[in-house]
Image (cartoon, helix red, strand yellow):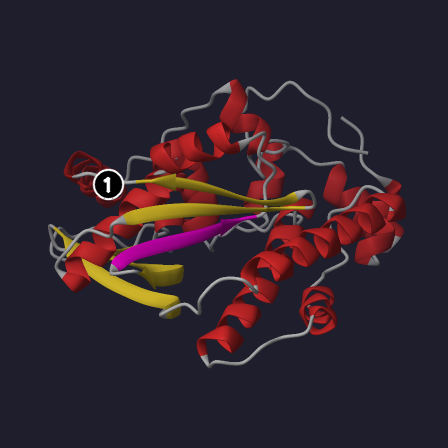
Amino acid sequence: WKRSRFLAETLALPKEEDERLWQTTPEAAIGRSAPPPGIDIDPINHAETPLNLSHYQIDDYLTCPLKYKYVHLLRVPVLREHTIVYGTALHRAVQAYNNRQLRGQTMALDDLIAIFEAHWVNEGFISREHEERRLQEGRDALTRFHAFAGTRQPPTAVEKRFRFEVDGNIVTGFLDRVDEREGETVIIDYKSSSIRDQKAADKEARESEQLALYALAHRESAGRTPDRVELHFLTPGGIVVGQAVKKDKDLQKAAERVREAATGIRTGLFQATPSQWDCSFCAFRTICPATVWAGEREG
């Protein structure tokens, strides 16, 4: 792989620091962030100790236990991916819009885009042209969202916090949006990724482990399963809504995923489970000694 010259400029790295960052072994890159000798990196070493898990922690562990260790125990710093920058800025803007709508207020399109731009971070892009293209895609997506959301009723909750237990393991997180539509409860999660068509969006919603966990969270707090879950894909070409109904078997599977991740974390099982697909999207693909990623770094 080769690095992008734009990256060093973006991060304002001196030449020697830029070279140190890229000309390194995987062990050295990981070792720079490792805790001092003698400090236990795994705080969960007693069965009775409460373990707090989010969807992302559960997903990280079940995708690859070594990835979980890098992210949540060693806390190895990584260069931010442009997809994360884009998605975060987009979600912040949508959240602000929904909060305004929750209070019975409106938001002008210019204000919505200004919030998006205020949360933009100049990191991870392979060129200035790449960054400008992504910025414009975000503006276009929010223009579509503004027209779409303006015709819909206000939410009943935005960024609703949840907390429940599965076999003594505490699961926490936030629901992007909850709607009550003609007596039906709908949980909504926003996605900044592209989607091919309606059929693909519905498939994503049906197979979403995240939405299954959110449906379980709602049942634990409200005493009933939500009537429907939705993924709202925010794309420059329009808003595509994937819909699904989560059944008891989906919620049971979500609870089992919590148990599986918690058991592995408590017992200190952090063996890598590399795959071509997962490694290609992993932020540690260029430094992890277990990677099977065979591509080249962007740039």
Q: Is residue 138 left or right of residue 58?
A: right
Q: Quadrant of the N terminus?
A: top right
What residue do we see at 53% from left, 77% from top?
100
Say which element carries label 1.
Answer: helix
Q: Is residue 161 left or right of residue 27?
A: left
What residue do we see at 57% from left, 65% from top?
150
Residue 181 in the image, given as x and y percentages of width and height: 33, 60
Q: Nearer the viewer, residue 136 or 128?
A: 136
The stretch drawn in magenta includes residue 190: yes
Q: Nearer the viewer, residue 33 or 169?
A: 169
Q: Nearer the viewer, residue 199 or 263?
A: 199
Residue 260 in the image, given as x and y percentages of width and height: 22, 37
What residue do we see at 48% from left, 35% from top?
201
What residue do we see at 79% from left, 56% from top?
11
Quadrant location of residue 175?
bottom left
Quadrant location of residue 287?
top right
The residue at which mark 1 appears reads as 254
User: Would residue 168 be visible to someone looking at this image?
Assistant: yes
Magenta: main secondary structure equals strand
Q: Is residue 223 left or right of residue 69?
A: left
Residue 24 in the image, given as x and y percentages of width and height: 70, 36
Q: Is residue 236 left or right of residue 95?
A: right
Report the magenta residues as a range.
184-191
Instruction: Rate crowding at label 1 as few (under 14), some (14 to 19) or many (20 or more) other CA atoms within 10 Å.
Output: many
Residue 141 in the image, given as x and y percentages of width and height: 67, 51
Q: Quadrant of the C terminus?
A: top right
Amino acid type at circle 1 is: Ala
